[in-house]
Amino acid sequence: MRKLKITELNRISAEEFKQAEKLPLVVVLDDIRSLHNIGSVFRTSDAFRIECIYLCGITATPPHPEMHKTALGAEFTVDWKYVNNAVDAVDNLRKEGYIVYSIEQAEGSIMLDQLELDKTKRYAIVMGNEVKGVQQEVIDHSDGCIEIPQYGTKHSLNVSVTTGIVIWDLFKKLR
């Protein structure tokens, strides 16, 4: 095996990305404080052609040099919008026909490996603050919660890691 050079990857241009068909998935970032986590979510969202990222509450918006360190330009390719309140974002997405899941450990949550999706529907996932998680009010306005099964001694994963795992799983289920 030989590692491929970046010129051999045949990546699409930013213009082609903007025109390309997107995965029917919106990522809502609520009160994410780390610019590196935000940038990482942009980069993952670019990789899987996510429709849009909603940046809510204290979540910073592009452009920002610290965000760019992990986004590597994805903050310029992935569509995003700022919404002051995540509850408003969730309510608006639901009105537009999205099924909204908060990614949180909650009573009655669906384990990610048990989640079944309808390929004819559009989805949104809400990612919460690094310390407090998804706000209860946001959960109350969501259609449900998704939880990643975990088997170690820790009870949580980094928000950008969690987002990557969930996006990858939903990508496989929706394609």
Image (tube, grey):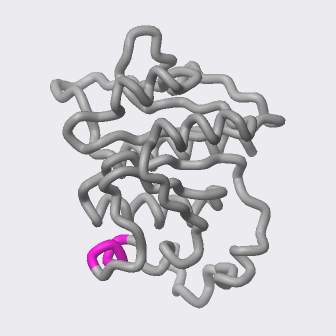
Q: Using the image as rendered, state which of residue 1 and residue 8 is in the foreground.
A: 8
Q: Image height check: is 53 above or below 124?
A: below
- Which image quarter is the C terminus in? top right
Residues shaded magenta: 66-70
Q: Main secondary structure of the magenta part?
A: helix
Horizontal relation, residue 27 to residue 161: left or right: right
Horizontal relation, residue 61 to residue 82: left or right: left
Residue at figure coordinates x 20%, y 39% from the top left? 131
Q: Using the image as rendered, state which of residue 89 and residue 29 is in the foreground.
A: 89
Residue at figure coordinates x 54%, y 43% from the top left? 89
> How far across and how far down the image is residue 15, in percent?
71, 83
> How far across and how far down the image is residue 113, in percent?
53, 25
Q: Image height check: is 175 above or below 36?
A: above
Horizontal relation, residue 25 to residue 128: left or right: right
Q: Image height check: is 139 above or below 163?
A: above
Residue at figure coordinates x 59%, y 90% from the top left? 7
